[in-house]
Image (cartoon, grey):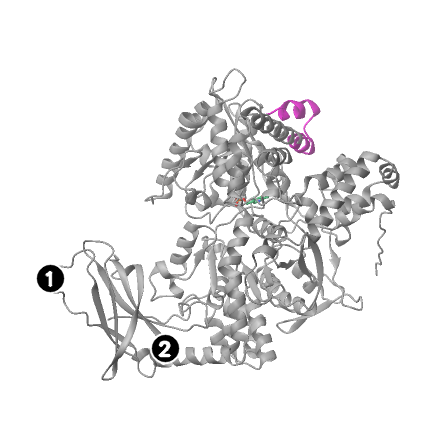
Amino acid sequence: MKIHSFNVQPNLPENIKFLEELANDMWFTWNWQAILLFVMVDSKLWTAAKRNPKWFLGCVPQKRFEELSKDETFVNNLNQVKEAYYNYKKNPHTWYQEHRRENGNLLTAYFSMEYGIGEGLPIYSGGLGMLAGDHIKSASDLGMPIIGVGLFYKQGYVQQVLNREGWQNEEYPDNDWAHMPVTRVTDAQGNEITIDIPLGAETVKACIWRVPVGRTSLYLLDTNLQENTPAQRAITEKLYGGDRENRIRQEVVLGIGGVKALQAMGIKPTVFHINEGHSAFLLFQRIIDIMNEKHLSFSEAREIVWASSVFTTHTPVIAGNEHFDPALVRKYMQSYADQMHISWDEFLALGKETPASATYCMTVVALRLSAFCNGVAKLHGLVSREMWHNLWPNLPVSEVPITSITNGIHSASWISHELNELYRKYLFNGDQRGEVDPSDEHAWSKIDTIPNEELWKIHSVRKNKLIDLVQNRLKRQLTRQGFDIMTVKKNSKVLRPDVLTIGFARRFATYKRATLLFKDLNRLDKIVNNPARPVQFVFAGKAHPADTAGKEFIKLIVGLTQNDPRFKGKIVFVEDYNMNTARYMVQGVDVWLNNPLRPMEASGTSGMKAALNGALALSVLDGWWDEVGPCDFGWSIGGPENYKSAEERDAVESESLYSIIEQEIAPAYYEKDANGISSAWLNLMKESVKHIAPVFNTNRMVKEYYERFYIPANNYGMILQEEGKAQAVAQWRNKIAQNWYRVSVTDTTPQPEKAILMGDKVNFKARVQLGNLAPEDIQVELCIGLRGTLGGIVKEEAIDMNCTGKDGDAYTYEVSMSPLNSGRQDYAMRILPANNNIPNVLTPLFIRWEE
Ligand SMILES: *Cc1c(COP(=O)(O)O)cnc(C)c1O
């Protein structure tokens, strides 16, 4: 059977036609006045349409549009939003316009498997997607030239449906492009663009959807086309869906297809940002393109690609890093190795952590072929350097070139509109067009000017809204589960607005330890049912469909909340955690609980969302919270120490959790005056917002990516594309490799005749053998620091030594310096390659210490 379809557009009256334009740009997701317009059209329908305006507009009866076009208030509001939107789109004074300082024209292509932009576009599953969405939104706000590339999944974010026993089942609603804010990308003649992607023995076709996100766009590839076979159409069926084979096919479509799609659209990025290893195959397509276009060899083209690639790794969980069976990789990537004229073994080596590794790891590929690599919080940077040290075996761990740029959140997307208004009133005046920059520390420092009563009132409003949401969700859930009306009514009357409320919501990956709170139920009973200082808890979260252990956690918590009289109505589990649920929770709770196994939570962002809304953090010293440091506006569970066993850790940390709630949190919260306000608590809220809001947001983060990565990646990429440069660097690298075995350094510093006093200069000397290399090819460093436990030196400072001449067949090097500290000083000398035309000499990994 052949099914045809056509699309009927709602026929909006002229004066409110703008609603259609608004529905087609994800800009509305972070502009409350815009959202309010849809709510005014029909608030029930808006919720029923899952806050997807395009779908929503298609459901509104024509009669309602006619009414609205005559409603003066509505039309006025609409015109205000329209003006704000157009001003935003054409503002020539964006942060980027005023601060840009790279050479040429930067354009960053950001590749990610998932994006959490809004509920109406459910192509995300968790924190990685949220971060990608927030990155793109802040790029838009800053006017930064970044476009997103991803996949358009037919079945979106899994919905969680709990059965009576509290077991999680899943539903996958279909994403229908006709109801999504997406349009097919066409060429200049108006023909829809499709691209061909070689996929092993097959060729798969993909089309491209564009999603406008304010000043920027997201491009999504889709293989669900009639021209494709059923198996090919299934490639983009489900986010992280299917078997290993489908996963690698998805990653070929995202990485290789993504580069081809940009080309087909005539978009020429200067920097590629790989957000987690899934899209790392893009590196190969770029190498192939540059080889063909510039007639370069693999090693020459690789220099250009490496210098202009950015890679962000997101997880210390081993299984979270994509590993493939080499045979599977060969099936799909042999043809790409052929196009690069490298052998299969050479290709494979790029993805093997060590020559002995049995798997091909996408993280390893991305680390090897990107000059700019980072983890997503300071502690995660440290953990990543240790985790991937094998790739740079001669380098001290501290110098492994994986730095960190700490994650953030797109503030406007996560702040409650009530609180946003309050912040606007007291903290932000906005620029001439009303835009505010959440990374403006000065603005946040004015938070003490907000009267406590006002802040508390807003917080209470949001708490009541959260309680309403929880009750409604419970009603829906219990009704669906077939309970009678009386039971539904009775069992959904939960939570009290005057009680200290602690929230916990995240994916139920086991390392996040959702059940830590339930370790000692008697103790928890005393906390929850303390007559003077009661505490209530709101939980939410999904387990991965295949994660039985995570589902057991959910079942256990749901069971306690439904069947244990001590906790019934006081600890609740909200079904179907998603962006919307997340928003209600982070905006309504008093305290946000985060207790993963340190250091498994690379950053975590839900705590930042809560903090922005005035909730206080109660967290293990992991991810972003670890770098807030010791503070008096939140609480740290346990310490940074390592434990002998998981049991011991759980015991120590649950004890710490209980006693902090009992002895610190509850007393501060309930220290209320006659007006029911605890000024101690409000001061904590203000301190917390003041310190956290300006730092842990994506505006700060995207600026940091710009300064530290995008500018140099753009500039080095350009330098290396100059005539002959890539060849010269490749030759230099080859020469280094050929000669490195002959390179050596010997310390010839004379023994001091008398004790060295602070302030004295010491003249360090070395003899250096270079084989066929010249002093320009290398640098000699004096590393001063302390002897490490493994025999190496932990570098505190590396000082360049200067070539002072030749002594026979060796070069002499010298540097004089005054020791910075007294006491024993350890030092070591080493030789590194040197080249001004590349961003980072550590990556090729030649390093020679004195032996
Ligand atoms: C913020 C958010 C996450 C990520 O939260 P973490 O603290 O990193 O676990 C996941 N899912 C949704 C829906 C979110 O809003």
Picture quadrant where residue 575 is located: top right
Which residue is at 64% across, 53% downward?
93
SS assignment for the magenta stretch, majority: helix
Residue 845: tell me if it is visible: yes
Question: From which residue to which does the magenta span run?
Answer: 473-494
Residue tagged by mark 2?
776
Give the distance between the C-alpha atoms of the residues marked 2 and 1, in whole angstroms.
36 Å
Residue 718, image x, y percentages: 54, 71
2 vs 1, front mark: 1
Residue tagged by mark 1?
754
Mark 2 or 1, nearer chain start: 1
Mark 1, other Cα within 10 Å: few <14 / some 14–19 / many ≥20: few
Q: Is residue 662 above or below residue 843?
A: above
Left or right of residue 5, residue 828 in this image: left
Residue 419, image x, y percentages: 60, 34
Q: Is residue 603 above or below residue 849?
A: above
Asked if the beta carbon under badge 1 is closer than 8 A to the nearest atom of ligand 1, the reply is: no
Residue 740, image x, y percentages: 34, 78
Which residue is at 43% across, 51% downward?
380
